[in-house]
Amino acid sequence: MLQVAFIRNNTALVKERLAIRNFKELDLVDTIVSLDDERKKLQFEFDETQSKINAASKEIGQLMAKGEKVEAEKRKEDVATLKISLQPINAKLAEIETTLHDEIIKLPNLPHTSVPEGKTPEENVVVREGGNKPELFPGAVPHWDLAKKYDLINFELGNKLTGSGFPVYKNKGAKLQRALIQYFLDYNTDAGYTEYLPPFMVNAASAYGTGQLPDKEGQMYYMPADEYYMIPTAEVPVTNIYRDEIVKKNDLPIKMTAYTPCFRREAGSYGKDVRGLNRVHQFDKVEVIQLVQPEKSYDILEEMVSHVEKLLQSLQLPYRILKLCSGDMGFTSALTYDFEVYSAAQQKWLEVSSVSNFESFQTNRMNIRFKNADGKMELVHSLNGSSLALPRIVAALLENNQTENNIKLPEALHKYFGDSKIN
């Protein structure tokens, strides 16, 4: 959530950055400033009246001490009248503050100045590529056929148990999932991230804090009886660990990692692009999150990008890194890098990670602050990235490493999987 003071002091800049993001309701910025003007006016009126009440109350005490009870009673009547006059002011102030909040949360984050302008994913910019695309043997097949051949994943059983988009991993398929999760967590903790295992359900306050509400209700599974949401990513519970807290400057950066299953409705997803593991409703993912000092957040963003890149390199998968254009970024992001791996059998790129800097957009919602060098309270910046999401990693590993007799695994996974191949 953008800060009201920043919007007031930088109205033209806010409109300019929102326009670059292709946000259409630019007049909402003026509405917010007008509402804040009204809020300030009411707050002044409230404070002035309260000041009169405080002064009169003090005077009543002095009059009583002097024995001037008649005058004291008159002042009490004045205080009662002033208190009555406060009620409509207070009610109107609460109403304006609610309306102001409801309008501000409609604004997405402002894109960083380095974000390329664009409207569609086709306008994302490739930053760099790594690895080599494999040359597969004649007769190589996509991962859904490999999963059936080697008895790794049963998509039909998942459909029976739950529905489409809920695969059942079995045998060495289940073991590969476990191996990847453990490897990713070890890789992250070796880099200084503290591991968490958070709840897989969150309340509305947590979903609001990271920006899933009110923007992404349709993507989350909701349990109305308990008013809980199944998490779409570990980012939601883990970032909220520090909600409404003042962190110590010396504790920054705070580095956290977590494995969780993730649940996404992905409404409207159909066709060949969702076959197999390309798009599922439940999947495993390991996440990295950092809370940092504002002036260091973009350097740390690059560090996190490098961290994920080295992880992909260790899996020996061909990859590319894209800087998302202004029209393709998430609602809360100021700058996002996407990682894609090449699926040789499908001959297409598959997204496996997003690494984003949210600046203070999330932490303003969650009220996560620290004392800066001047001793003043300041919002920390939050960042997160997938390290990594498993389904498309598994798809690429199976497809790119298939031979006529088995599926070879990268060396980094041998000790975790307990073998060098699947056969």
Image: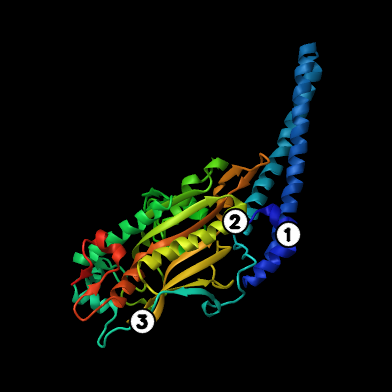
The residues bearing labels 1 and 3 have C-alpha atoms spaced at a distance of 45 Å
Label 3 Cα crowd, 10 Å radius (few <14 / some 14-19 / many 20+)? few
Give the mark nearest the N terminus, 2 or 1. Answer: 2
| Classed neighbour count for the residue bearing mark 1: other residues with Cα under 10 Å, few (<14), some (14–19), many (≥20) | few
Given the image, on which type of amino acid does mark 2 rest? Met
Q: Are marks 2 and 1 in contact (CB under 8 Å)?
A: no
Residue placed most toward the observer, 321 or 130: 130
Judged from the image, the secondary structure of the residue bearing numbered disc 2 is loop
| Residue at screen point 55% across, 54% down | 362
Q: Nearer the viewer, residue 343 or 49?
A: 343
Q: Nearer the viewer, mark 2 or mark 1?
A: 1
Residue holding disc 3: 272
SS for tag 1? loop
Q: Which residue is mark 1?
A: 10
User: Does the rendering let one see residue 264?
Assistant: no
The first of marks 3 and 2 along the sequence is: 2
Residue 182: image location, x then y, percent? 31, 56
**Where's residue 348, x and y in %?**
40, 81
Residue type, numbered disc 1? Asn
Q: Earlier in the sequence, mark 1 or mark 3?
A: 1
Residue 1, which numbered label? 2
- The location of residue 149, given as percent across then percent down, is 19, 77
Q: Is residue 375 at all visible to an observer of this figure?
A: yes
- Left or right of residue 278, residue 140 in this image: left
Whether residue 345 is situated above or below residue 174 in the rendered picture:
below
